[in-house]
Amino acid sequence: MARVLVGVKRVIDYAVKVRVKPDKTGVVTQGVKHSMNPFDEIAVEEAVKLKEKKLATEVIAVSVGPTQSQEVIRTALAMGADRGVHVEIPAAEYELLQPIHVSKILAKLALDEKADLVILGKQAIDDDANQTAQMTAAVLDWPQGTFCNKIEKTDAGLTITREIDGGLETIKTKTPAVLSADLRLNTPRYATLPNIMKAKKKPLKKVTAKDLGVDTSPRIEVVSVEDPPVRQAGATVADVDALVAKLKEGGHI
Amino acid sequence: MWRNTILSSSSKLVAVSGSAATSCRRLAVATPRLASSQQEKSKSTENESFMANIFRGSLVANQVFPYPDVLTTDQKELTNSLVDPFERFFAEVNDAARNDANSKLDDTTAEALWELGAFGIQVPSDYGGLGLNNTQYGRLCTIVGANDLGLGITIGAHQSIGFKGILLYGTPEQKQKYLPKVSTEKVYAAFALTEPSSGSDAGSIRCRAVKSADQKHYVLNGSKIWISNGGIAEIMTVFAQTEQVDPKTGEKRDKVTAFIVERSFGGVTNGPPEKKMGIKSSNTAEVYFEDVKIPIENVLGKEGDGFKVAMNILNNGRFGMGATLSGTMKKCIELATAHANNRVQFGHKLKTYGSIQEKLAQMSILQYATESMAFTISQNMDAGSKDYHLEAAISKIYASECAWYVCDEAIQILGGMGYMVDTGLERVLRDLRIFRIFEGTNDILRLFIALTGIQYAGSHLKELQRAFKNPAANLGLIFKEASKRAASTVGLGGTDLSGHVVDELQPYAKKTAHCIDLFGQSVEELLLRYNKNIVHEQYLLTRLANAAIDIYSMVVTQSRSSRAVKLNLPTAQHEIDLTKALTIQASERVIKNLQAATSRSSKALNDKMSEIALNILEKDGVNTTGVLDQN
C-alpha cells in the first residue's frame, strides 16, 4: 500500500496555435485556452488506477505555478486524486522557473507527504524539457523508471516496461521510486461533471516555495523567443535532371 | 433575405413531437383581455420585458443594456471546467453519424452520458444533479448543438421539458421522490402534451383523468403522440382534462391538470419508435394510457392549472434551443470556412470569391445574433426575471430559422461535398428541420409574440383612456404620454439608445431607436384601426412579429459588442462589424415589415393572397391549366 504523488502542470492546450508575443519575451498566454499537460493526465490516470486496484492508498496531485494552476489540480481531483497541493509561484517568477526548481520542490513534498511513489509526465508540451522526473529522482536519490509503458506491482517492488528507441525495455525497481509516464501507458479518463462538482469539496493545500525551503531564483535569462522560420515557397522543376541539379546546387546531395 | 425565403414558403405547419405544444390557447385567452384589462393594470407597470414595452412605445432597457453578466467568477470557472469533459465525450465516445444510422443511442454511449452527468444538469446537487443555472446549462447546450442534435433531443426532452415541471412546480416530496431518479438513476423522463387532434391547439387535449370516489387517485385514459423519449421514459409529465368546480359559481368545467405518471402505475404502454426525417437517435413514440391509477399526490401544480404548467415549462426551456443552435451554427461555419480556405477552383481559393465571402459573413452575423439572444435571455432568467417569454419565443424562432439558413449555406459552399453523407452536414440539416416545428411552431409563436405584446400595449391604452375620464387626478400620466407622443410624431424620435452603446455604434443605435419608435406607432395604429379584431389579422400580426424579432436582434448585438469594446476583447472590432452589418439589414427589414403591416396598399396584396389560397384549397391543389393541356 502506497501513497502516490503526481505532478500536474498547466500548459497551453495542445490544440491552440501558439503565438509569440510582439516583444519576443515569451508566448501569448492571456485569453488562451490552457489545460493539463497531456502526459500528466496519463500520470494521474495511472495513479488513480493504482488506487482502484488497491495498490495505492492515497493520490496527491501537485502543481507548481501561478494561481490558475489550481484548475489542473481540480481536474486531477475530478479524475480521482484525493487531495491537492498547490505550490504557488508568482506569474512573473514562473516564466523563468526551470525543472531544477520544480524537482527540488517535488522532492521536498515527496518526503513531507511520505510518498512511496512519484509519477510525473515524461515531459510538458510547452517547454519539452523532459528533465523533471530524472532530476527529482536524483535529488531524492531514489531509483527512477522513465518513459513507462507499463507499471506492474511485484512483491519486491515494481516491474516497469519502458519505451526506448527501437523497442521496449523491462526493468525492476524497488520503491520508493520516481516514474515518468509515456504516451502509451494508458488512456486517461475524462472527468465527469458530477466528479468535477465533488472535486470542489476535496482538500487543496496552498504552500509557497519558500515554505518548502526551495530557492526559486532564476538561473536563466530569456534573450529572445522567436517564431519558427516560415517555410519558403517551393518551386517547380521541369524534370528529374533539373531536380537533381538543383539538389546538388543546394548541397543536399 | 434569409427570412424571406422562409416566409415565402409560408406553409402551415403542424406541431410535431413530444415536446410540441404551443401557446395558441394562450392567444385565445389573450383576446378577451384586450377589452377588459382591469386585472392587467397593476401588471402593466411592472413588466420588465424590453420587447413587451416597445409594443407600447416605451423603453425599459435594463434587461438588455448593459449586456447581462450574472455569473460569479467561481461560476464561470466551474462552467469552463465542465466544457472540456463535455467536449471530450463527443470527441471520444459519441458518434453522431452512427447514432443517426442506427436510429438510436447505443447502450455504451447512453451509459457514458449518464456517467457524465448530462441528464441532471439543472437539478440541485442535493437531489444528485449538477445544480447549474440556465446560463451554465446554455453553455453546455452549445457543445451539444455543435456535435449531435439527436442526442440533444434525448437529453433535452428529458430535462428541459420531461421533468422540468417537477423542478418548477413539484412539492418537496415530489422532488425528493423523483429528482434523484431522473438525475442519476438512469430513469428517463418525457413530456406528454400533444395528441392526435391537438397539436398547436394544446388546450384542446382529450386525455381525461377522473377522480375516484374516495378522492385518493385519478384514473387516466387517452393517448399522446410524438412523445420524445415516449418509448423509454419511466416518468412522464402528462396533461389531461379534469373536471373542476368553480368555487364561486359551483359551475363544473373541464380544465387541464398536470400529472406525474410512472410507467410502473400500470396501464401505460407505447407504440414503436416513429421513423423521422432527423433527430433519429432520439426516441419518439405514441404513448397510451388505459385506466392508469395516479395517486392524488402526483398532481403537479394545482388541479386545473395544467395549461399554465405546460406553457411555463415550455417557456422556461425555450432559451436552451437558442443556445444549442448557436453551437450548431458555429460548427457549420467552421466546416464552411475550412473548405473555403482550401478548395481551389478557377485557379483561386474559394475564399477569394465575393459570393463565398458574402455567405460566410452572413452566416457569422446570424450566429452572433442567435448566441447573443440566447445568453441575454438565460442571464435574465438567472437574474430572477419572470418577463422573458416574448424574448424566449423570439429567440426560438430566430435560432431555428438562422440555423437552417446557415447549415443550408454551409452545404452550398461545400458544393457536392456538402451533399455527401460523410461530410455530416446533411444530417445536421435533417436534424434542424424539426426546430421550426416543435415546442411551438414558429408560425404560432409569431402570433404569440404579436398578440402578447399587443395585449400589453392594449392594457396600457385602456389605462390611458381611464385617465382621461378623470384628467384632474391623472395629469402626470397624461402629460408624460402627451410629450412622448409629441416627440415621436414630430419625428424627433422618442426613443434614445445613445447612452447604452459605444461611440462607434451611435449611428446604428439611432437606426434601431427609429425602428422602435415606428414599431410603437404601428402597434398603436393597428390597435386603433382593428381594436380587438386585430386577433384575426394574421398577415399583419406575422409582419409585426418579424419586426419585433429584428429589433431584438439589433438590440442584443449592439449591447454585446459594446460590452466587447468596453472589456477590450481582442474580438471587439469584429463583433462591432457584425453588429453594424446586422443593424443595416435588420433595420431595413423592420421598416418594410411595419409598412406591410400598416399600409393600405399591402392590404390589397394580402387580400389577393387569401383569395389565391382559398381558390387552391377549393380545388385541392394547384389551379392552373398546364401549358400543354388542351382547353
Image: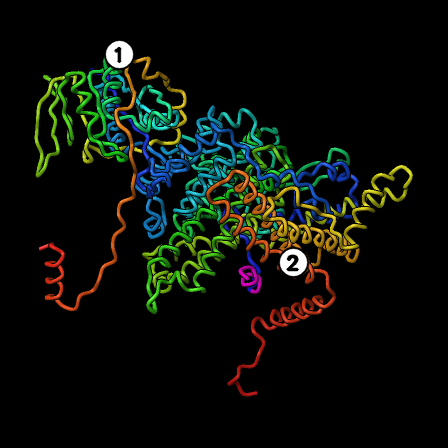
Q: Where residue A44 sits: x, y (%)?
A: 26, 27
Q: Where residue B373 sits: x, y (%)?
A: 55, 45
Left/right placement of residue B75 relative to residue B456 reads left
**Quarter of the image holding residue A246?**
bottom left
Q: How many marks?
A: 2
Frontmost residue, B43 versus B309: B43
Query: Secondary structure under badge 1?
Result: helix
Does B228 sit above or below residue A157? Answer: below
The color scheme shown is rainbow
Q: Where residue A179 sits: x, y (%)?
A: 18, 24
Asked if residue B182 lies in the magenta stretch, the reply is: no
Q: Where residue B111 sits: x, y (%)?
A: 34, 36
Say which quadrant the N terminus of chain B sits in: bottom right
Name, please, the residue furthest toward the bottom: B630
At 39% across and 27% down in the image, what residue appears? Answer: A68
Q: Chain of mark 1?
A: A
Frontmost residue, B562 versus B176: B562
Residue highlighted by disc 1: A112
Say which quadrant the C terminus of chain B sits in: bottom right
Q: What's the distance in space between the residues labelled 1 and 2, CA to CA?
A: 73 Å
Specify the segment rendered in magenta: B1-8
Residue highlighted by disc 2: B543
At 65% across and 53% down in the image, what residue appears? Answer: B511
Q: Are marks 1 and 2 on the same chain?
A: no
